Image: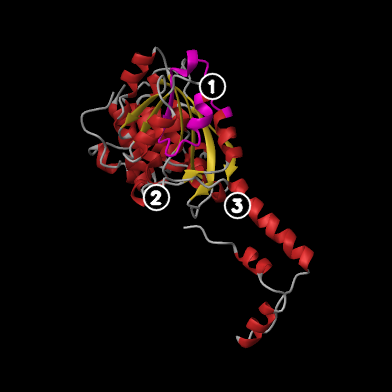
Amino acid sequence: LFRAQPSALASVQLPLCIEKALMPRGTGLRMLAALGAARALVLPRRCAARSLVRCAATDTERGAPKLPKGQFRPKQSLGQNYLQDPNYAARIVDALQCDSERGKRVVELGPGLGALTKLLSREYPEMVAVELDERAIPLLRERYPEPITILEGDVLAVDYSALSAARGGKLSIIGNLPYYITSQILFCLCDHHASVKKAVVTMQWEVAQRLVAKPRTRDYGILSVVFQLYASPKITCKIPNTAFYPVPKVTSALVTVDFPEDRELFPVQPAKLRTVLNTAFRQRRKMLRQSLKSILNGKPCPEEFATKRPEELKPEEFLELTALIFGR
């Protein structure tokens, strides 16, 4: 189920409020005075006790993953930010709504510690999960034995067409995508659009905005055109960075991408379309008669597009432009 060449892209401390709550009432003031501090806030005993309880409850609610000690720290090289908020995990799973028998056609990308897998396995007991981190494989297979299938490999190297055929229909994709290869994974799913019914994935908020951006806006670009031609993307909700461990510096989004079965065939070759898109948006502020010179081979740019900039064209107009340059 994997292509021959995988893609190359591919200790607990007490919170400060607890320490303060456990400190004798006068000690903090004496310490601060000794250090030359200007002011100190001393809470009443009851208030301090409530702060202790509230802080402890917050840590519990966050539910940070309990990792096997010393062997399973998140790898920065793999872009690992584990989902740790159970409320958002439930919301992501609820958005999938796959009707395949026992979830045979559900595919989770990068399950990590299994925050989504735990919920998915209850509803889709014959699902598939693809994980690259070799440390996670025995852990996942122990927690989620057959009939759940755990595949070890790069999600960019999966042959989704073969997997779809083996599972008897179009796939429903779900996953918390690594930020650094989100675009590559999205384009990979587009390459296999005939084998994918739906994708419910998390990504950086800015990338999600580019997926749904409209013409004449700053975020409108290649991702916008491609996904609005191949599918119907929709931002379901915003996810705060505190929902992940370790906490990233960016906000995320939950995005649902539906690939329609009745989509009309493009009148041009997809490779030619991408050539036009890459060339045009490489110089997005220039008129198309200038930015497309390298692929026009001395021919004039089609008159109706010559003085327009790429951000002004609707997705369907790029199909027309491609046909005028390369033929149908």
Instruction: Return the x and y of residue 283 as percentages of the image width and height.
Output: 36, 48
Instruction: Give the mark nearest the N terminus, 1 or 2.
Output: 2
In the rendered structure, find residue 59 and report the number of the disc placed on it. 3
Tell me if 295 is positioned left or right of 194 in this view.
left
Asked which quadrant contains residue 134, the reply is top left
> For the point 53% across and 44% down, which residue is it?
84
Q: Choose between 195 and 31: the one closer to the eye.
A: 31
**Image quadrant in which the C terminus is located:** top left
Instruction: Give the mark nearest the N terminus, 1 or 3.
Output: 3
Q: Residues within 10 Å of mark 3 (few under 14, many from 20)?
A: few
Q: Secondary structure at mark 1?
A: helix
- In the depicted structure, whether residue 149 falls above or below residue 154: above
Tell me if 169 is positioned left or right of 274 in this view.
right
Q: Choose between 268 and 148: the one closer to the eye.
A: 148
Asked which quadrant contains residue 18, the reply is bottom right
Q: Secondary structure at mark 3?
A: helix
Q: What residue is shown with label 2?
A: 73
